[in-house]
Image (cartoon, rainbow, N blue to C red):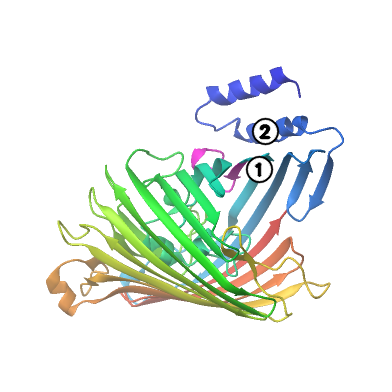
Amino acid sequence: MDERRCRRGAANLHQDTTLKIPFRQAVIALSLGFAAAVSPNAAADFSRYGTAYKSDDGQFSYLVNARLQYDAVRFDDGRTNDLTRFDSQDGSYFRRGYVTFNAKWGQWGARFENDFAIGVELKAVREFWISHKLAGGEILIGQHKPFRGLEELSSSNELSLLERPAFATAAFGGNIARQFQPGLFWRRPLSKTLLLQLSAYNAHQGLGQPVGRGVGTANRLSWIPVNTQQQLVYVGGSIGYDYFTDGNPGVRSVNYAGRSSAGGNVIGPSQRIVEIGEDAGQFFAGFEGAVGIGPLHLQTEVVLIDNEDARGAGRDDQVLSYYGQASYFLTGERKEYQSGKARFGAPHAFRHGWGAVELTARYDSIENLDRRAAAGSGTCLADAAVAIVGAECETHAYTVGANYYVTPLVRVLFNLVNGYNEVTDDHTQSYNVRLQIAF
């Protein structure tokens, strides 16, 4: 590809600010453009991580990979009264369809990632940043996940269950629009066992959404004092504050017996739990812990959120969310610790040629400590009189599952989710299956 063609591709991309049509072509153009910069003698490595190229001098490399996650869900509606009715939509759909491009050139790095299950538009962009070595660590400029928690930062390819703990994400007042946000992100290993992660970002929305409506910071410290083939001990924590200067993310609902797809075409029952005040802030603090004994992995997180002025001037909402989950490999493998990002991943090598089998379980809970549900309303209210006679503003989810790792690239997952909503006394189950391929 010559220089004029690269300039024409860049001009076309600039002219269409909606990025609706040339987005896919832009991904291909970037890949081919970087390939042209590599020596003709560079070798291609078709590994489990994608297609990689590296220059002869080792200064330049790039990697292109993708993931496909195709889900099917069946809801068993547990309606006990009219308040629990919802439009359950059984079916199958693409949960994720990522294409990821990574590049390194000396001390510079870059990543571009789009989720085609959402579409070819700005809000479908996941990660989009450049990086450089700084002060013994690495600084990222662009769109990335704020450093809010262990499971939230884990790759969707590596999760033990189909979904992350939904309630911890909802406690942040978050949804898909706040999962990835533009800003500055810096991480540095303080020692072989200690990692510091700092972030400052636009607090309101990610790319393709309204900007300039607030600022936020999320910071995380992770320590793994024990990490051997037979034993693992991990401790971490995060703390942060978001301030919304113009408007706010509003009320957030939690899906307690199923999750919506990326496009929103499949959804389970939900309950409003979190509310953020007008022109106010949100403080959060989280604890993370994990223990591994051979093939057994136990993990927990506790998140406490304080939403300023959520019930009126000077009346905050405090929301508590926590989960405990377990994973056990019947075939003897163990979850791997990824020290560069302080998170856990699936095993990359199996003891048997036919694959690996993992059993999983999780208990997940969220409660608004300052609200109750009025009898017959199905809504968490802030009125003091309601708090005396009302039900707890709380939902739970119990999940059990099994994973079959056909190869390191292919996995089949099954989850049975039993949700319980204390506000409406609803019990709903969902049966979820996923075929996952990474390449």
Residue 168's x, y, as percent?
42, 65
Residue 166's x, y, as percent?
45, 65
Tell me the magenta residue range: 110-125
Residue appearing at x 33%, y 55% in the figure: 241
Amino acid at the residue labelled 2: Leu
- Marks 2/1: CA–CA distance: 9 Å
- Which residue is labeled 2 in the image? 30
Quarter residue 357 falls in: bottom right
Answer left or right for 25 relative to 223.
right
Residue appearing at x 49%, y 47% in the figure: 185
User: Decide: marks 2, 1 in contact (CB < 8 A)?
Assistant: yes
Residue appearing at x 36%, y 46% in the figure: 204
Amino acid at the residue labelled 1: Phe
- Which residue is labeled 1 in the image? 101
Residue appearing at x 14%, y 56% in the figure: 313
Outermost residue, top side:
4
